Image (cartoon, grey):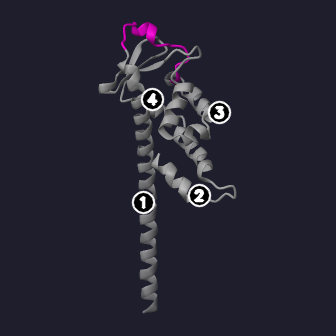
Amino acid sequence: MEKKYELLLEQKNNEIKKLQKQLIEKDKIIANLEGKNTIYKVISEDYKDVAKQPKTINNNKFLAVSNNFINHPEKVKKLIDSQLTTNYVACGQKGIAQFAYNNLLKDDEGNLNYICTDSSRNMFKFKNEEGSVVKDVKAVKLTSMLFDAGFKDTSSKLAINIWKNEDGTINIEKFQNFKIL
């Protein structure tokens, strides 16, 4: 009789482990989607102001082609690794937008290479290496490129430093405040 209960207990424990693994996988998927959603919101909100400005300039002159980040994902990875700091991450969505603006959305001369052309439709544009204007509806290409370049992983690693105490323990209050961002 005791072996029967031990077998049932082992089966239940295995089922619990299986369900825990499934829960962890679902949490990873949710976190990934939440991260993409955050980046999308940041980009679309910050560039609505640009879209409200009158556009009498020809797009060929308005958009820069040189060193466009979307055309060079390896460059983006290097920028994320070298330029993304806890100062950007600690500011939440505004910090992410500032990082993108400072490091990705302008060329070396300070010309915009990614713009919002219609905020009501979440329409963004950039030039490819051939000089053709490419539409990026809802900034999907930008968001995907950031995730593919490791933005989420790098920012997550930096974020840990924000809510860690000097002794290495987690400061729950800082963590909860950061999660709200």
The answer to whether the residue labelled 3 contacts the one labelled 2, judged by CB atoms less than 8 Å apart, is: no
Q: Earlier in the sequence, mark 3 or mark 2?
A: 3
Residues in magenta? 54-69
Q: 144 or 5, which is in the foreground?
A: 144
Disc number at residue 171? 2
Q: In the rendered structure, does residue 167 fall within the stretch colored magenta?
A: no
The answer to whether the residue labelled 2 contacts the one labelled 4, judged by CB atoms less than 8 Å apart, is: no
Identify which residue is drawn at 40% across, 7% down: 57
Name the secondary structure under disc 4.
helix
Q: Earlier in the sequence, mark 2 or mark 4?
A: 4
**Mark whose residue sits in front, 3 or 2:** 2
Percent across and percent down for residue 45 are: 40, 31
Q: Earlier in the sequence, mark 1 or mark 3?
A: 1
Percent across and percent down for residue 107 are: 55, 17
The answer to whether the residue labelled 4 contacts the one labelled 1, judged by CB atoms less than 8 Å apart, is: no
Say which amino acid is labelled 2: Asn
Say which amino acid is labelled 3: Ser
**Mark whose residue sits in front, 1 or 3:** 3
Name the secondary structure under disc 1.
helix
Q: In the rendered structure, does residue 64 fall within the stretch colored magenta?
A: yes
Is 151 positioned to the left or the right of 4 in the image? right
Name the secondary structure under disc 3.
helix
Query: In the rendered image, which residue does mark 1 sit on?
Result: 23
The answer to whether the residue labelled 2 contacts the one labelled 1, judged by CB atoms less than 8 Å apart, is: no
Identify which residue is drawn at 40% across, 23% down: 49
Q: Residues within 10 Å of mark 2 (few under 14, many from 20)?
A: few
